[in-house]
Image (cartoon, rainbow, N blue to C red):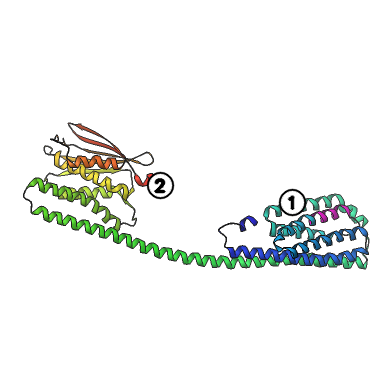
């Protein structure tokens, strides 16, 4: 219990309450014990010297503990240790040695010692005192009880008074500790209800804050998407004034790249999860949009197969741009002589934080004249951004890109 009170998670008010409760218990027990054992010392003086000497020792111990509490009440733990250890020794000695008197109250005193250890010094010491008390009682019953029964005589008036005082004292102390336990339990319930109310209020505030932040993030994604759409509209309007087909194609490539990013923000503000998107659904919509905007009248079938569910924004934007460039290059350079054009995309997990993207078409890419196109340079740049590698295989029946990239969100989680 002492270690529990030192926990940082317990409010200072509760710790102070427990400290005050123990100080009050130590002081009041010392006063009560001193009064009880002083009376018992007087009554035992007329009974026998051995009983008187034992009660006198107990009285002296109680007086010392009371002086300790008067001198500095912060030493209450020392007082509890004295009462627990010395009390057990005195009771055990009485059970084992003094057989000429009845030990009716000793079991109650042992119970007091156990309760006191549990309540003030912790469960560990409480269990030790409980085990030792059971051992002492067992030894007394099996080794000394019969001998004591043979030695017992009728009680004198002083012995009856002494027994009555001792019983009243033992019952009073045990009842007082039980009362303190009920008080502590009531206090704990009150604090628990207060804490529950505070946690409930905090949860309500957090939920409201989360709803506000969610609405704010949705609004941000919505506005970003709208701004990108405005840029797309401006580029389309500008492209209408260009007569050169090559320049119009450059405009369209820029529009496709902006659309790839715009669709991500559109899906994010429409999605329940504001940080991740299903990559399969996104790529399907992206490729469909690219083909609708393509100048080519050729029908191209595409297939997307993925074992990856959702990925985060940090990885999805470069992957979307990467797929946009690959699809655009296929439509632009690969399908002039193909009657049944087909594109296939496979995405697989590779290790704990990497993705394997396999892009293939059944066309033959036209050889590049001069320097590499901007699209191919952008593909290499995006792969480098994702700390990836690529392999390109060109055959008569098609071209295949095998790309290994890093899933940046999973990398951050693992880190």
Q: Quick one: 84 or 284, which is closer to the camera?
A: 84
Give the main secondary structure of the magenta stretch: helix
The image quadrant where one finds the N terminus is bottom right
Sequence order check, earlier mark of 2 and 1: 1
Pointer 2 residue: 413
Residue 325 vs 41, above or below: the answer is above
Secondary structure under badge 1?
helix
Residue 364 found in image quarter: top left
Q: Which residue is mark 1?
A: 131
Mark 2 neighbour class, 10 Å CA radius: few under 14, some 14 to 19, many 20 or more: few
Disc 2 versus disc 1: nearer the observer: 2
Q: Which residues are magenta?
A: 87-100
Quadrant of res 75 = bottom right
The residue depicted at 40 percent of the width and 65 percent of the height is 208
| Label 2 residue SS | helix
Q: Is residue 99 magenta?
A: yes
- Please give the name of the residue rendered at 72% of the width and 65% of the height, measured from the top-left corner: 25
Q: Seen in the image, is 387 located left or right of residue 132?
A: left
> x and y percent of residue 415 in the render?
41, 44
Q: Where is residue 194 shown, x and y percent of the image?
A: 54, 68
- Residue 231, above or below 176: above
Image quarter of residue 14: bottom right
Q: Is residue 4 visible?
A: yes
């Amino acid at each position: 219990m002492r270690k529990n009170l030192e926990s940082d998670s317990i409010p200072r008010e509760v710790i102070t309450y427990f400290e005050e409760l123990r100080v009050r218990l130590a002081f009041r027990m010392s006063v009560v014990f001193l009064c009880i054992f002083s009376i018992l010392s007087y009554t035992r003086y007329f009974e026998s010297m051995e009983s008187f000497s034992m009660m006198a020792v107990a009285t002296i111990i109680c007086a010392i503990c009371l002086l300790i509490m008067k001198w500095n009440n912060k030493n209450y733990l020392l007082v509890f240790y004295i009462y627990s250890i010395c009390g057990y020794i005195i009771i055990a000695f009485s059970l084992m040695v003094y057989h000429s008197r009845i030990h009716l109250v000793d079991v109650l005193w042992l119970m007091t010692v156990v309760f006191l250890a549990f309540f003030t010094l912790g469960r560990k010491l409480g269990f030790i005192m409980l085990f030792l008390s059971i051992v002492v009682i067992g030894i007394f019953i099996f080794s000394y009880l019969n001998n004591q029964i043979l030695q017992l005589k009728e009680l004198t008036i002083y012995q009856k008074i002494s027994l009555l005082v001792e019983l009243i004292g033992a019952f009073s102390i045990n009842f007082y500790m039980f009362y303190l336990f009920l008080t502590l339990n009531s206090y704990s319930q009150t604090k628990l209800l207060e804490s529950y109310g505070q946690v409930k209020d905090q949860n309500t505030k957090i939920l409201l804050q989360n709803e506000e932040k969610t609405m704010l993030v949705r609004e941000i994604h919505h506005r970003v998407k709208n701004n990108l759409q405005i840029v797309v509209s401006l580029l389309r309007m500008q492209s209408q004034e260009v007569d050169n087909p090559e320049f119009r194609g450059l405009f369209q490539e820029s529009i496709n790249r902006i659309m790839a990013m715009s669709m991500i923000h559109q899906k994010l503000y429409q999605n329940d999860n504001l940080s991740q998107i299903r990559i399969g659904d996104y790529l399907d919509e992206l490729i469909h949009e690219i083909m609708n905007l393509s100048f080519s009248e050729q029908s191209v079938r595409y297939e997307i197969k993925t074992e990856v569910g959702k990925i985060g924004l940090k990885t999805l934007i470069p992957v979307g741009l990467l797929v946009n460039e690959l699809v655009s290059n296929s439509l632009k350079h690969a399908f002039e002589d193909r009657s049944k054009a087909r594109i296939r995309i496979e995405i697989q997990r590779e290790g704990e934080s990497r993705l394997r993207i396999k892009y293939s078409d059944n066309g033959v890419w036209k050889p590049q004249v001069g320097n590499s196109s901007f699209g191919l340079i952008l593909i290499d740049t995006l792969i480098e951004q994702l700390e990836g590698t690529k392999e390109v295989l060109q055959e008569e029946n098609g071209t295949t890109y095998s790309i290994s990239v890093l899933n940046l969100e999973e990398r951050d989680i693992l880190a």
